[in-house]
Amino acid sequence: MKSRYMSAALLGLSVMLGTAAHAQDSYRSGIFAPAKTASYPCDDSQFLQDQQAFEGGLITADQPEDICGIVTAVLPEKRTRSGHHGYFYVQVASGVVIEIVSDLDRMSAPRWPWVAVGDTTYVKGRYYFDNMDSQGIDWTHHGTSRYWPYAGYVVVNGTKYQ
């Protein structure tokens, strides 16, 4: 699942658009209040340009990115040395799927998974490119640091999580 190119057809997953009832049902009462729904423009052209520049060695530093697309796969929550993380994959163009990493310890969101196959997403975060098999978008949570000055978030079917 670490490959940067995965097609929804190969995964055998159908794409459905619409509001996900699972997200509405999974809010923890009193702990999580979702942001109001909003519209987010979908334009992956800058990300696709940056991805090619990384592959060609023209860019070497992590980049702030805004991407959008359809969720093609959701992985179980995973504990790493830096905390609990949720992983999912978004198809941003024909044949181009990118891994999204969400730091669940830093996000105000319902219990994982709060995203499902077929959901429409808009993601603001940090694009890292270690090599062809290790790339994705992380820092999808609120807050900044001296190492990364941009706050991120994930929008699922119009509901913002950060």
Image (cartoon, rainbow, N blue to C red):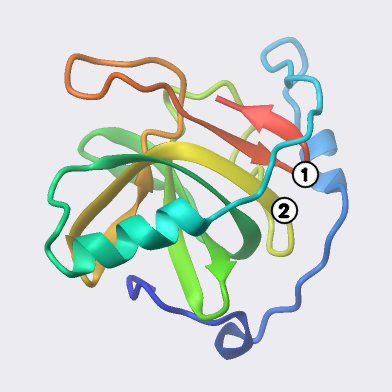
For the question of whether residue 88 can be seen, the reply is no
> Which sits in the foreground, 50 or 77?
50
Residue in view at x 57 percent, y 21 percent: 108
- Residue 13, percent across and down? 68, 79
Give above or below for 151 relative to 124. Answer: above
Q: Residues within 10 Å of mark 1 (few under 14, many from 20)?
A: many
The structure residue drawn at horizontal position 70% and vertical position 37%, both measured from the top left corner, is: 40
* Residue 121 visible somewhere in the drawing: yes
Position of residue 63 relative to residue 50, above or below, is above
Query: As rendered, which of 127 and 78 lies closer to the eye?
Result: 127
Give the secondary structure at mark 1: loop
**Which mark is drawn over residue 120?**
2
The amino acid type, in three-letter code, at marker 2 is: Thr
Residue 110, x across and y down, in percent = 65, 30
The image quarter containing residue 2 is bottom left
Q: Does residue 80 appear to the left or right of 111 in the view shown?
A: left
Q: Which mark is residue 31?
A: none
Q: Depth check: give the residue in front, 48 or 23.
A: 48
Residue 27: % across, % down: 75, 27
- Which residue type does callout 1 highlight? Asn
Question: How far separated are the C-alphas under marks 2 and 1?
Answer: 5 Å
Q: Secondary structure at mark 2?
A: strand
Which label's residue is closer to the chain start, 2 or 1? Answer: 2
Which numbered disc covers residue 157? 1
Residue nearest the viewer, comparing 117 with 38: 38
> Disc 2, disc 1: CB below 8 Å?
yes
**Quick one: label 2, few (<14), some, or many (20+) residues within 10 Å?**
many
Relative to 12, residue 30 above or below:
above
Q: Quadrant of residue 92?
A: bottom right
Instruction: Identify the image quadrant of the N terminus.
Output: bottom left
Q: Is residue 28 above or below residue 21?
A: above
Quadrant into which the C terminus falls: top right
